[in-house]
Image: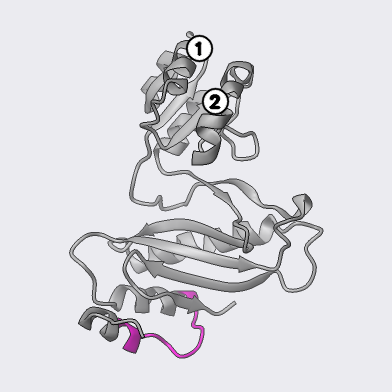
Amino acid sequence: MPKFTKRQKANLDMLPADPVSMEEAVKVLKSFKSPKFDQAVNAVIHLGIDPKQADQALRGSIAMPKGIGRSARVIAFCNPDVAPKATAAGAVEAGGEELVDKVFGGWTEFDVAIASPDMMRFVGKLGKVLGPKGLMPSPKAGTVTPDVETAVREFAAGKQEYRNDDGGNLHIVVGRMSFSEADLVENLRFFHETVERIKPSAAKGQYVKKFVISGTMTPGVQIAI
């Protein structure tokens, strides 16, 4: 049997026995005894999809209406005339083949990589470097785009990529514990509506099976679907 701390035991005792409304779930989450740092609030939706089928896989990007309380380090693979605009928009590095070579040499001090379509012929060689880290630019994720400046600004401000895992789950950060209840509910509702909107036509039966939110160091609270 696992050993729980006093805080963990107290939080488990506060868990509702049944799924609750989105508003009540956020209220319970914020009432948990918390560590001293501002925890991330995570949401997980378990979906009735077959992850092995390409026509049921979900991948894209999402920007929460109330943000997520943190920024990301973004780089941009782009032509020299675009690089200053990308840097001004928030990129920590922007450039063409010289930046590709820098990353190929092992530099990966960034969270998101954006690329213009014409740069992909150079960026392609980074597949073995960026692929395993989930950092390879992709049109589906919105990280390969002709509008590099806008993409850099959005991802630097907290726009996130999402992709279902092998169990058919989508994980996303919806804010911080310091957010107001109203802002967390708005972000959660936006995430849920986005997931419903991108339902694959090939998915059969119940689509959204389970919806849970948690803090970095709290139990999960199940939301009634």
What residue is rendered at 29% in x and 82% in y?
3
How far across and how far down the image is residue 34, in percent?
24, 71
User: Which element type, helix, strand or loop, lies under badge 2?
Assistant: helix
> Does residue 202 appear to the left or right of 124 in the view shown?
right
**Magenta range:** 11-22
Residue 210, placed above or below residue 201: below
Q: Disc 2 residue type? A: Leu
Query: Label 1: which residue?
Result: 97
Question: Magenta span has 19?
Answer: yes
How far across and how far down the image is residue 47, in percent?
65, 66
Q: Nearer the viewer, mark 1 or mark 2?
A: 2
Residue 193, quarter of picture? bottom right
Query: Label 2: which residue?
Result: 126
Please identify the quadrant where the C terminus is shown: bottom right
Please identify the quadrant where the N terminus is shown: bottom left
Front residue of 184/47: it is 47
User: Which element type, helix, strand or loop, lies under badge 1?
Assistant: helix
> Does residue 67 appear to the left or right of 62 in the view shown?
left
Front residue of 155/216: it is 216
Q: Dot 2, how many residues are within 10 Å of its Cα: few (below 14), some (14-19), or many (20+)?
A: some
> Does residue 98 appear to the left or right of 170 in the view shown?
left
Question: Magenta span has 177?
Answer: no
How far across and how far down the image is residue 73, in percent?
37, 34
